[in-house]
Image: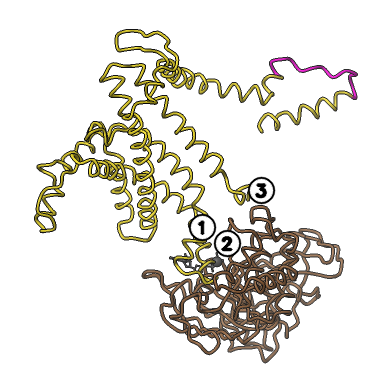
Chain colours: A brown, B yellow
Amino acid sequence: MASVGIREVRKSFGSTEILHGVSIDIVDGEFVTLVGPSGCGKSTLLRMIAGLEGVTSGQISIGERVVNNVAPKERDIAMVFQNYALYPHMTVAENMAFSLKLKNAAKAETEARVQRAAEILGLVPLLSRYPRQLSGGQRQRVAMGRAIVRDPQVFLFDEPLSNLDAKLRVAMRAEIKELHQRLKTTTVYVTHDQIEAMTMADKIVVMHDGIVEQIGRPLDLYDRPDNLFVASFIGSPAMNFLHGEIGSDGGPAFHGKGGVSVPLNGAAGAGGGTPVVLGARPEHLKLSDDGFPVEIVVVEPTGSEIQIIGRTPGGEEIVANFRERHAFEPGQTVKLTVEPNLIHLFNGETGKRL
Amino acid sequence: MRSMVEGAPTKEKRMASTTVAEAPPRPPLAKRLQESRGFLSFGFMLPAALLLLVFLTYPLGLGVWLGFTDARIGRPGIFIGLENYEYLWDDSVFWLSVFNTLLYTVSASILKFMLGLWLALLLNENLPLKSFFRAVVLLPWVVPTVLSAIAFWWIYDSQFSIISWALIEMGIIDHRINFLGDPTNARASVIAANVWRGIPFVAITLLAGLQTIPQSLYEAATLDGASRWQLFRYVTLPLLTPIIAITMTFSVLFTFTDFQLIYVLTRGGPVNATHLMATLSFQRGISGGLLGEGAAIAVAMIPFLLAAILFSYFGLQRRKWQQGGGD
Ligand SMILES: Nc1ncnc2c1ncn2[C@@H]1O[C@H](COP(=O)(O)OP(=O)(O)OP(=O)(O)O)[C@@H](O)[C@H]1O
Ligand SMILES: [Mg+2]
């Protein structure tokens, strides 16, 4: 096991820069997820840690060692690819034993390690099958088995669950998490699914267009997003945003389009007249007579809660969740408020949290 | 597949109708035939089967028949049983041609395989001007055989050979090489010409095969600690075997039946050292006019060709790892 340090790393393909100076510190034994929209450079960063891509500038270290110029096979990392990359001409057992075979490990030792990994992953009855004869979830487990057998310093996962159906994905999510708790191997896990990131990680790195937007524990990102991007990316359904400014008259309050007004804590207020964006999570919106009006467009009961999608007088979309079974009707107008200490305020120009 | 899919709803309809009418009506014959898989596939195969029958089986049958007669050009022969074969059995030139054909096929195929694989691996790297080189590699194959044979004829000419000239200029040898006049040299020369001509086919098909191997397998193996040689040995080679098998079967068949190169370069000489079964058959049958004997030599090639095909069919069939569920 080892820590991983990524310092001011940049990556260019030809003349286009893909990563614009990324710094991440990963502690020994930590489970870190890299999350972000498609094309933001997650896979590229992971492949750079693995050594499959060169580093244009900056520094990557594993443990104490700077690995910029260390060959992939000397880095002692194991990677699980999105398409699993199982060797089609080898059985499950041979796939898992391949790295040991290349190291000329003793036969008995190899067998013991394959057997142990197969037991952890429930692959024992499949050991003599070929990859073509396996289901997607089984292949995924073989890919993990191949990594476990290596007993590496660091595990790298590149969207390993994206080929699986929803149910299997949830099951494998728990399995990977459990595996990490058992092995305590430093893990970097790439995903574009924020639920996966939230549920599995000790620490989440939110990336966007080749930069790191925020690094933090899952609930910290949820409760205190640093900027508008993180606020909108983390959480499902996404946070509601109202555009407006801080009122200077009377007590501190937010004044939005169409006469929407929301009272604020004094502490949250910035200078009067500055353009701001107010963020409120759907589950933090409450019915209240002195709230702002929202015209309901769609009502979606999910059983455990009722979700409404509505519009403010200023034409901004609002999503709200209620645990109580209110009888909402489309076309009806309700009044909603947010508790001042649950409100997120962002600078309207820079998007930074106020 | 199609007929099964189409068949399903009719069956359901029939089951539904039984509740109304007592006896389900038997669909008309034309419809049943339309939905029968066997009949359909037979229908689709018929044109191809007819073509094969007319253009392949008939000439082949005629050849085999001629082998049992003493036909000459311009004179229909009579059936003489195995006489032609008995004669060939004691004919040392025939046995020499069998030896020559095997030597030619085996050494040319091995060389074509090794050089072709090497070239394919090279072309699969990220070279500058990649597509240009790929096009150039195809050239020997695109040029008509007779044309390239004539070019080789000049290259191997006892007076004007460019190879002799270059080696003499460089001071490596002091007299011209007798390429086609000496039995050993002549054999090596025709093999070299055949290899030159056959490499593109092997290289381009193997290159196509190489490109079906996913890059991520190489990356995974690299992370597993494989060296470049181990990547080749444990990833490239096993995954390429099915393509190698097919390519080399074809290559062996082409080489075994080669005629044009030899005919232009040496006509089987010197002293029959380069006579292949195909050229000997032509020489005896057409040039010498002994149609029956020529046909018998050609028929004698069939067992060898069948053996090669059976070997590739049974020995190099789809591997176990290729079978079973798809993706
Ligand atoms: N070999 C390459 N050459 C040029 N550009 C590349 C190369 N590999 C990736 N890119 C570019 O780098 C950017 C980041 O790609 P990357 O694969 O890291 O995205 P990602 O975050 O993993 O996205 P996804 O979630 O879709 O997998 C993309 O814009 C992509 O087009
Ligand atoms: Mg990716």
Mark pair 1, 3: CA separation: 19 Å
**Residue A232 at least partly seen:** yes
Position of B77 compared to A242: left or right?
Answer: left
Label ID, residue B141: none
The C terminus of chain A lies in quadrant:
bottom right
Q: Nearer the N terminus, badge 1 or badge 3?
A: 1
What amino acid is found at the position of numbered circle 1 in the picture?
Pro
Q: Residue at x 59, y 69 (%)?
A: A158
The quadrant the N terminus of chain A occupies is bottom right
- Label 3 environment density (alpha carbons within 10 Å; few <14, some 14–19, many ≥20): few
Q: In percent of the image, x 78 and y 61: which residue is there?
A: A332
User: Do the residues under discs 2 and 1 have CB atoms within 8 angstroms?
Assistant: yes
Residue stretch in magenta = B19-31
Which residue position holds label 3?
A: B325
Are discs 2 and 1 located on one and the same chain?
no
Check if residue B22 falls in the magenta segment: yes
Q: Secondary structure at mark 2?
A: loop
Look at the image and say whether residue A38 sits in the magenta stretch. no
Residue type at tag 2: Ala
Q: Are marks 1 and 3 in contact (CB under 8 Å)?
A: no
Tell me the residue that label 1 is attached to: B214
Task: Reply above or below: A243 against B99.
Answer: below
Q: Is mark 1 within 8 Å of ligand 1?
A: no
State how far apart marks 3 and 2 are (Cα).
17 Å
Identify the disc placed on residue A85: 2
